[in-house]
Image (cartoon, coloured by chain):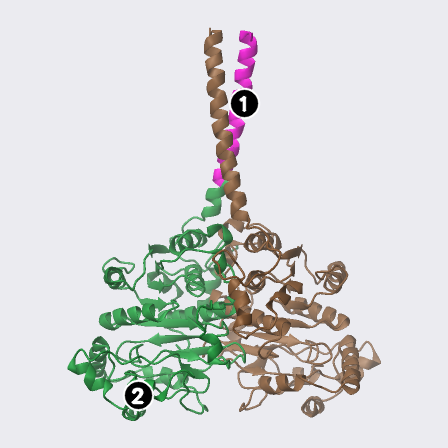
Chain colours: A green, B brown
Amino acid sequence: MATVEELKLRVRELENELIKCKQKQCAMEEAHSQAANRPRIDKMSAEVVDSNPYSRLMALKRMGIVDDYEKIRTFTVAVVGVGGVGSVTAEMLTRCGIGKLLLFDYDKVELANMNRLFFQPHQAGLSKVEAAEHTLRNINPDVSFETHNYNITTMENFTHFMDRISQGGLEEGKPVDLVLSCVDNFEARMAINTACNELGQIWMESGVSENAVSGHIQLIIPGETACFACAPPLVVAANIDEKTLKREGVCAASLPTTMGVVAGLLVQNVLKYLLKFGTVSYYLGYNAMQDFFPSMAMKANPQCNDRHCRRQQEEYKKKEVEQPKVEVVEEEEEVVHEDNEWGIELVSEVTDAELQAASGTVPDLPEGITVAYTIPAEEPASGDTVEETEQSLEDLMAQMRKL
Amino acid sequence: MATVEELKLRVRELENELIKCKQKQCAMEEAHSQAANRPRIDKMSAEVVDSNPYSRLMALKRMGIVDDYEKIRTFTVAVVGVGGVGSVTAEMLTRCGIGKLLLFDYDKVELANMNRLFFQPHQAGLSKVEAAEHTLRNINPDVSFETHNYNITTMENFTHFMDRISQGGLEEGKPVDLVLSCVDNFEARMAINTACNELGQIWMESGVSENAVSGHIQLIIPGETACFACAPPLVVAANIDEKTLKREGVCAASLPTTMGVVAGLLVQNVLKYLLKFGTVSYYLGYNAMQDFFPSMAMKANPQCNDRHCRRQQEEYKKKEVEQPKVEVVEEEEEVVHEDNEWGIELVSEVTDAELQAASGTVPDLPEGITVAYTIPAEEPASGDTVEETEQSLEDLMAQMRKL
């Protein structure tokens, strides 16, 4: 039977052990919360000290590259698709100190994603937007985040998506400055295209081929450049038999290199566009097999199936007439690739009959770029559509050339 | 005064609280160690399941891009410099499942590095190699790591560096398969050049300009292509007044985009070289202002200052005579950039007198590429050196053209 003295001793021992345990717990929590945070920074500084996360970016001003780097904090960018390209895109923008990011994805992180940058094995099972927001907030707490864990192509989500890109700017109620498409399928690209045409929202598209060795980025200005319904999406030919690519039930290959390069070229184009330096590319391809980078520009198609695209074209024409071009000319000159043999190349599966039935025009393309697929003719639901699809391929191409 | 019963109650309370505290601590530790690990994988599988981190890489075989992807596990790569380019390079190789990585750096992580990919704020203060190894091991525990937290340019460390790249392969005693230079200064590049010339070690160099808007990668095969002592290092001109770049005491600008693109192009070239697919680039530049990507190839200079380079050239010539070329020809054809106006461009600070005194040859360069600096003539310590530096620029260039 324990004496009072023995019990008192035991109480003291337990109290000490408990204090130690709680102290260790505190230390672990603190380490965790330290890991999670650096203090927010109110004003970007150019001071050259090790503790300033913006010193190397602000140096772009001193170097004469960017006039007003701080302006980056006033911009909002929506990233649709937070996979191999989208996650790295979001990370680059976060590290550059963008004002606000909207992230859209409905996928979960899997170990099968570990061959690309950004996500880590311990995040497997989390939603991509949730995992990404956590990592990005740690990296730069100065950025505002808004995440949406849904598929933008369903009717209800699409309406919400439209609402957020038109209202979800840094100042609620204002539109975002740019939408970036980092999705991996046709439906999602078309949904973004439809939304941006309706809203007159400038956006950039990106893509990586299923064989992992080519990719591209593209700037789309509704009414001015070709939209996704104007012409089939372009891809960089990777000099590989297309038949190998399209086998049923085969999982797509991917590489952290190709996706990192495409994300880098995309965000570089975003920075040049937002901060007004260098030449913004309309289309830039990357063929990893030959280290070949074709570039081009493509104008909107007056016969586009998307009525909002046609409306934007009308509005653009009116604006052009009202205020003559001042500085756009210079950019266009730089972008169009010289010395290329222009010719039409199509993926091998497309027959002439399918081509004739295609409602989108087939553009003249520089060497190394092909169309991914043609847009099938829609059911003749309205007289409008019939009229357009009745045109022969030759007519469409002749019109395209005239543009 | 407490009774025995009261004390017993207190002991029970404390014991329960202690158990709870220890349980929570365990849970925190487990969460931490789970975060730190996925199980090791003995054999790369092509199975298409969410839990297979290699499925998208093994798909490169099915797509006809790579014949034997598993071979990646047999290679060792040394990455010298774990900064903006080196850290992303190491991460890409880790995610691709490289056999072994050797990391060399002597810097610490700072918040000022947060404008580039890879490191996170909670790692500030850690050595770069230590922080990198921790992150990379979590991402892929199948990779072997060896880290060296030192400056390779000091005499003693240089000897150790030579030893490790000649002995530190996956099988101890065998050399590494490739050395990647991701350093940010001339001395470190020259140290790598000296070591690789002496050992006949193939390496790749990378660099990003101080204004953050251009970069390059370069493959160097001792005895075959120009080494760093053969000709001044090449850089991509960024169409910016060079005087802005060289102001004293100004910190260099950097961007996650440019560094991500350069790391992506570098590791893509590494994969193409190691796994034998596509065309390996000898020199590939990236000019972000115009999205311009010049490429070229440059042969070794028989008057190179580095005696080991000259020895490697002799050995290469002997080999060439003994076994005529079989497949190298094809690659060379692809790499040399066509349709370029070849001309010499030099940074504005270099005077003609300095040029004449330069011991390295000044190569013919394609548009958009310039030499970073010329190599100053050494003190005439040996007759050998005098003989070489006495040649006029014209002589050297004439020789260069004959190559």
- Residue B349: x, y in percent? 58, 79
Q: Which residues make up the magenta segment?
A: A1-30
Q: Are marks 2 and 1 on the same chain?
A: yes
Identify the residue shown where x is 64% and y is 85%.
B363
The quarter of the picture where residue B65 lies is: bottom right
- Residue type for callout 2: Gln
Q: Is residue A344 above or below residue A310?
A: below
Main SS of residues in magenta: helix
- As drawn, the label of residue A135 is none
Residue B383 pos. (x, y %) = 83, 81
Determine if the magenta segment contains residue A17. yes
Q: Give the residue number, with chain letter if any, for mark 1.
A: A16
Badge 1 local density, few (<14 within 10 Å), some, or many (20+)?
A: few
Residue located beneath label 2 in the image: A356
Amino acid type, label 1: Asn
Q: Is residue A189 left or right of residue B33?
A: left
Residue A367, placed above or below residue B150? below
Instruction: Give B365 or B54, whichever is nearer the viewer.
Output: B54
